[in-house]
Image (cartoon, rainbow, N blue to C red):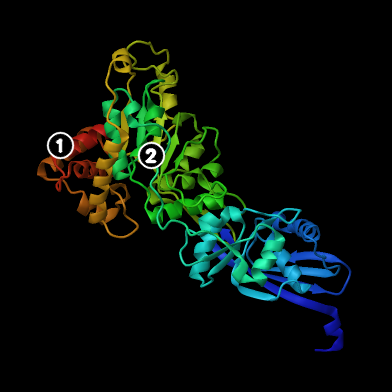
Amino acid sequence: MTPGLHQARLVLASLQSAAVFGVEAYAVQIEVDVSFGLPHFSMVGLPDATVRESRDRVRAAIRNSGFEFPPHRITVNLAPADVRKAGSSFDLPIALGLLATSGRLARRAIDDTVVLGELSLDGAINGIRGVLPIAIAARRLGIRRLLLPPQNAAEASAVESLDVCIARSLPDALDALNNPDRAERATAAEPRPRSALPADGDLSDVRGQLFARRALEVAAAGGHNLLLCGPPGAGKTMLARRLAGILPPLTFDEALECTAVHSVAGALPAGAGLLTARPFRAPHHTISNVALVGGGAVPRPGEISLAHHGVLFLDEMPEFDRRVLEVLRQPLEEGHVTIARAARTAVFPARFVLVAAMNPCPCGFRGHDRRPCRCTPVQIAKYNGRISGPLRDRVDLTVTVPAVSAHEMADSAPGEATDAVRERVCAARRIQQARYEGPEVRTNADLRGSAAAAACRPNAEGRALLRRAIERFGLSARGYDRVLKVARTIADLAGAQEISAEHVGEALQYRLSE
């Protein structure tokens, strides 16, 4: 190297970090170069505004932690350079890279540790999003050590065979890399999450509504979508909020998937590990289509992905914007949502049970035995027309929820408890797990094509009943398939190997009660 080149450059440092696109993580190499010249701090590698603002946070954190900020020309490269970087998780590796150039860090090239963290101006390290997907990717890439904020240690510890080190401040992080044996370690997470139930009350709180309770059990057993239609105060919301409680407990793999989505969205509570209860999401009817399905310049998961392996409840469904409802059609069929951008495509999981509630008319009292309806036929048709035919066709069970009588409210005994219903649901799910192989089909609602034809073939009496229903009511091809899947679930709840006319009849009752 010529003397001129040697004087023009002081030192180069390199650290390993990571970022998330969708729910998948990828490695990011942080390269910090300090050279002679007028003081200047530049960042390359497609940083967004959040990443560019780290210059001020890093400068203040280094000075307020008692270190000297290099008064030279600083260039930070985020590789790969053709992928846009977002978020504040690069603050800590950039600051450590600058300290490495001044000799504070023993090694200038650290590739055996993924470093993540947002810096406060006083040098404290704050929690970040998306740590669980990063921990999974680090193990896949063969990197066994992570240096993280304490708020994210619990979720990273859920990934086995990882050495999770905690740094509470910039000096702590420097000491952890210089002296790995003295670094504070996160306590190992439980190998499996403890099953927990949503705190939305017990199913025994629901008075009457035997038909709706049975539909709720069928929906939970087979993963079917459900529409509840009835007057105000009939108990539609109460029923919907108790559906998550009768679903089977999360498996370890399902808990990992749910937690990863919530971590990327920033919806995971600070210090939380794996989610233990199935998600229940109830967005307001003013929600936008992007907020529902996800999106943005750097795609973030929406409500349907936050409801993955749980329940998405749309109360007063006709009040939602028509365009918002229509974006549900693909996720309901495929179990995921694809968000395309010019450079990359993000795929978010969205395998949920949809529960929707609506009134029978704008005033809500059509068919009520005590309160008259004042809506005109045109108003009723317009109200019902807010939900398109293709979307209704993707709902497996439609149930009329009548008003509760005074006797049922005051004198009836409590209904069957959540625990008893969940036991039957779990038994039906175990039958389905034994019947199907592979991650693509977990419940009867997931069946497609030849697999559905093989698993859902009724006996002769059942086929004859279904044929008469098609001729009389004009079921669509999708409606025919969904009736068979619901009948298969009803047979599973009864422990029957064969789908009989009784099972088909009950499934048709849910389909034709619109």
Q: Nearer the viewer, mark 1 or mark 2?
A: 2
Question: Which picture quadrant has residue 33?
Answer: bottom right
> Which amino acid type is marked by label 1?
Glu
Q: Which mark is residue 502?
A: 1
Marks counted in the figure total 2
> Which amino acid type is marked by label 2?
Ala
Regarding mark 2 in the picture, which secondary structure is present there?
A: helix
Furthest toward the bottom, the residue is 2
Considering only order in the chain, which callout, 2 or 1, is on the residue closer to the N terminus?
Answer: 2
Q: Is residue 489 left or right of residue 353?
A: left
Regarding mark 1 in the picture, which secondary structure is present there?
A: helix
Residue 41 image offset from top left, x and y in percent = 80, 64
Viewer-proximal residue among 83 and 265: 265
Residue 102 image offset from top left, x and y in percent = 79, 72
Furthest toward the left, the residue is 460
Question: Which picture quadrant has residue 503?
Answer: top left
Viewer-proximal residue among 98 and 293: 98
Residue 258 image offset from top left, x and y in percent = 45, 51
Viewer-proximal residue among 296 and 193: 193
Q: Can you see residue 346?
A: no
For disc 2, the marked residue is: 244
Q: Is residue 205 left or right of residue 70?
A: left
Q: Is residue 298 left or right of residue 446?
A: right
Q: Quadrant of the C terminus?
A: top left
Whole-number angstrom distance, CA of label 1 to CA of label 2: 27 Å
Viewer-proximal residue among 480 and 315: 315
Q: Measuring 62% from the left and 57% from the top, which residue is drawn there? A: 149
